[in-house]
Image: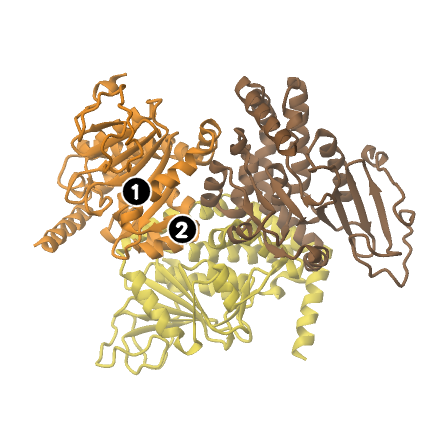
Chain colours: A yellow, B brown, C orange
Amino acid sequence: MAARAAWVCRAWRLPLRAGSPRRGPAAVGGLWGGAAAAPRRPFSNDKVRVELEESTGVAVVKLKSPPVNSLSLELLTEFSISLEKLENDKACRGVILTSAVPKIFSAGLDIMEMHGKSKEHYAEFWKAVQELWLKLYDSSLVTVAAINGSSPAGGCLLALSCDYRIMAENPKYSIGLNETQLGIVAPFWFKDAMVSTIGHRAAERSLQLGLLYPAPDALEIGLVDKLVPEEEMQSVATQVMAQWLAAPDHARQITKSMMRKAAVEHLRKHRDSDIQNFVSFVSRDSIQKSLQMYVEMLKQKKA
Amino acid sequence: MAARAAWVCRAWRLPLRAGSPRRGPAAVGGLWGGAAAAPRRPFSNDKVRVELEESTGVAVVKLKSPPVNSLSLELLTEFSISLEKLENDKACRGVILTSAVPKIFSAGLDIMEMHGKSKEHYAEFWKAVQELWLKLYDSSLVTVAAINGSSPAGGCLLALSCDYRIMAENPKYSIGLNETQLGIVAPFWFKDAMVSTIGHRAAERSLQLGLLYPAPDALEIGLVDKLVPEEEMQSVATQVMAQWLAAPDHARQITKSMMRKAAVEHLRKHRDSDIQNFVSFVSRDSIQKSLQMYVEMLKQKKA
Amino acid sequence: MAARAAWVCRAWRLPLRAGSPRRGPAAVGGLWGGAAAAPRRPFSNDKVRVELEESTGVAVVKLKSPPVNSLSLELLTEFSISLEKLENDKACRGVILTSAVPKIFSAGLDIMEMHGKSKEHYAEFWKAVQELWLKLYDSSLVTVAAINGSSPAGGCLLALSCDYRIMAENPKYSIGLNETQLGIVAPFWFKDAMVSTIGHRAAERSLQLGLLYPAPDALEIGLVDKLVPEEEMQSVATQVMAQWLAAPDHARQITKSMMRKAAVEHLRKHRDSDIQNFVSFVSRDSIQKSLQMYVEMLKQKKA
């Protein structure tokens, strides 16, 4: 498989050859990286780090694209490739998605990819966004989002695509599809995922206003499933994953697919028109100006 | 535009020429009518009063058809024309819908229009009901219902069609689609709006039983978004509207349209058959008798 | 009507001839069987007992197939026939569905019907499951589930198909679509009924994990509508039924049909493929092994 060739296997702590995991007495160590000799297969692209623990079948996928894990074309592509490899790896049954960057899960789609580029670039970018979503939302693996920081727009979409969402119990962290506030529009499949999660009424208000929910409000509205103290996120994510992995894989996978089929097919049937819509929308002068203003506001915030 | 010609511009308090609003130091006054020299364009039909405040872009639309704001053919037509004018008026960005009649928002469709008339009349009436709903539910303006009294059946539909619903905190006021109690059936698009707002299960029970919810119950079930003391309704409605107007218009409008498209198209595709259904249903002897009994019950209540 | 001929009229307590109910001073007695001379028409198959109280139009349908009211082909067939007769009986307006077996409402589909039998048998069995569901979910009668014991899988489906669910306030009783835990998959129409009742998000988690909810959790998630002390179930079920029967029948029936039409048509259109799916799924060696293990686990539990 072509994608397999792109699998970048870099050393991480203890170099381990894929397929020949070392098993030692310390195999019980934490999933997040503190353990000495856990039987893991770590892989790493530039912007996505994958640690697959063979004893449990659980991979931790960490976004590591500082400062805010913006979903650039590069990150999207690496993430898609990583997911595809895990999907095809019989040793893997579940994925915990989290961030290696403090205080931010993901800031969402990289505005620089939608600003001042060619139409071809916009089309390629949007196709990569669709591709990642289809892979994540339609994954046969158990997917748990460990939202350890703020998660607006596309960051929220990543979380919405998982099977379960835990979020750090920090009211400074917020989550939501706030596209409207930027003068842009969440596409129909972002909307479908939001409606499936919090219902039509809450989604309508939320999307029209572009609301960001502080963690406690996100829990109340059902946008996340559980709040936990930040220092307990890894242990709770591991427990949640164990609960989900206790269900027989095959039956769980067919059930998941049945639940998500309509939304997945909705996008698959309209991928091209969705790309065209995005390109023509984002190419408008008014939208480019709007994004320009936003970019400058971000720059001022930093300064 | 033809409809424009029908725009009845009557003097209200201080005559103001449209397009040349007077701006003065007292422009901060209340939206509902207490202010001295606010830059407003007041218009009024017989049954609908419209006050557009140019400084904010917010129009207050008040139903004023005592005793109970029944949705007669005349009121429906005036309301539709008013909405169309506001939709086409660049000075208008939002509508607050409320009642000028104490204790009642709207009692719903005027039963006298469905009773003892010709089939042609029933068809004309029903078309007007559809037309108003399509204009209100699919409006690109921000629409806030300030429900300052009871709101059964068609009155509830008006409220359901807005973007946000505040209701007077008075348990004597109730709201709901209670058609079943009258022996008639809420049409599929009333149902669609109800399901979108409170979910399938609550809507099923609510519609089968024809339930009317006192204000506190309506809040709990999600049929309204907020309860406020009656004397604070105007200020809260104004605050809510300001929050909604803070979102960029264009992105908000596209988002709203995306959320409501399915329900709007559902009716647009079946308008004729929906009219035929209504006419044949309401023409039945049994339904006419049922409505007759209801009309007489109402008369006895008055006496 | 052919089905009519199958109506088995057995004596129960006081023999009453169908069509000539005795009306006496004690007619107020409890629906569940304590009354002395209530004007009832009791009927009974081997596994389903029907008591129709003519004064109220309410039939109590009790599943009586110990030890756990498994939905065998025989029970499904008798239940369908009973429902069809009640549907066609003008004296009947509502059905209270409950169990005559202590601590269990229904354990769901009889695994023995899916295990070690011919493909023809599996097909016949599945058709009977579909048939019962279509009759119950699409019934024009008011249907109230009085869930007086645990109700997993197919037992939960029966409850979901009623208009209202009351459950005994006993945390030892649980309810849910737990098929996944058995290594099998709830079909799309079980899923549709679950989504309509508790929403997409809760249904997705619930079905993927095969969750069983103790009564208090079932209330919280909206899987049942009301908890009552077990000794009050009959009186509360009777009160609830009276509330539902207060709505005009004709309008309520059309409304119910409108609410459930999409789900009913979804199955009607795909009945054959749904049967084929079930037969090919359940015929797999892996599924047969999985069911075999479950059967043996049940045997060990008993021993």
Separation (CA) of disc 2 from disc 1? 21 Å
Disc 1 target residue: C234
Vertical position of residue A256 compared to residue A172: above or below: above
Instruction: Kindly identify which residue carries mark 2.
Output: C222
Q: Amino acid at mark 2?
A: Gly
Residue C280 seen in this snapshot: yes
B242 horizontally vs A140: left or right: right
Residue B259 marker: none
**Coordinates of residue A41 in the picture (x, y in percent):** 32, 72
The answer, for residue B248, to whether it is visible in the render is no
Measured as percent of width and height from the top left, residue B153 is found at 59, 37
SS at badge 1: helix
What chain does mark 1 sit on? Answer: C
The answer to whether residue B17 is left or right of residue A19 is right
Q: Nearer the viewer, residue B186 or A15?
A: B186
Question: At 77% across and 39% down in the image, what residue appears?
Answer: B48
